[in-house]
Amino acid sequence: MLRVACKDIGIADCDFVVEGEKVRKVEGKMLEHLREEHPSMVAGLTDVQHKELEIRIKSDMHGLEPGAQPHEIDKHVMLRISCAAFGTAGCEFVAEDRKVRKVEHKFFDHLRDQHPEIIAGLADEKYREVERRVKEAIEHE
Ligand SMILES: [Zn+2]
Ligand SMILES: [Zn+2]
């Protein structure tokens, strides 16, 4: 069951709640309610603003199936590290993954393959220093 309340989308003094099985239906009922009870929220909206409102309703909906709708975005945050951010001038390599460990792994593979001089023969202490720099260079999208 999906559910979205007026309170969820920022209308604090209204107790209206929509429940339903389908995102589209819950969204439709909420928009209908907004038009009837809070016309100022929907009146005179441009297409873009209307789309934003729909997105807001969707993203505040509770109980969505995992991987079903807007919450999917949160779960698919990409981590990224580019060789340039790491400090290797002139290399376009970028490693991406959802897990820090995997991004690091991919990047170290790349360093071993393409820039062996950076990690070859490093003492443990220096190697940890490189690891720290890699961690710092990882960007969260
Ligand atoms: Zn309301
Ligand atoms: Zn590189």
Image (cartoon, rainbow, N blue to C red):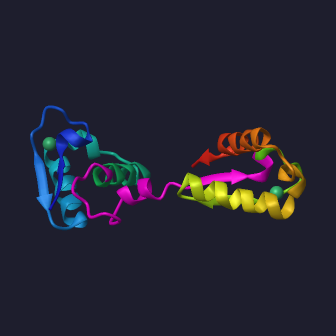
Residue at 19% over, 60% down? 26
- Residue 83 magenta-drawn? yes
Q: Is residue 92 visible?
A: no
Residue at 26% over, 64% down? 65
Q: Is residue 9 visible?
A: yes
> Most extreme residue toward the top, as rendered?
13
Q: Report whether 135 appears left or right of 109.
A: left
Residue at 33% over, 48% down? 56
Q: x and y percent of residue 102 in the render?
A: 59, 59
| Extent of the magenta region | 59-85
The N terminus sits in image quarter: bottom left
Q: Nearer the viewer, residue 54 or 67?
A: 67
- Residue 35 magenta-drawn? no
Q: Which quarter of the frame holds ligand 1?
A: top left
Q: Report whether 3 appears left or right of 80.
A: left
Q: Nearer the viewer, residue 103 or 6?
A: 103
Residue at 65% over, 46% down? 138
Q: Report whether 116 appears left or right of 47.
A: right
Q: x and y percent of residue 123 in the render?
A: 81, 43
The image shows residue 111, relative to residue 14, as above or below, that is below
The image shows residue 7, relative to residue 109, as above or below, that is above
Q: Quadrant of residue 130?
A: top right
Q: How many marks?
A: 0
Q: Nearer the viewer, residue 65 or 28?
A: 65
Q: x and y percent of residue 84 in the render?
A: 80, 49
> Most extreme residue toward the front, as rendered?
123
Q: x and y percent of residue 105 in the render?
A: 66, 59
Q: Nearer the viewer, residue 86 or 57?
A: 86
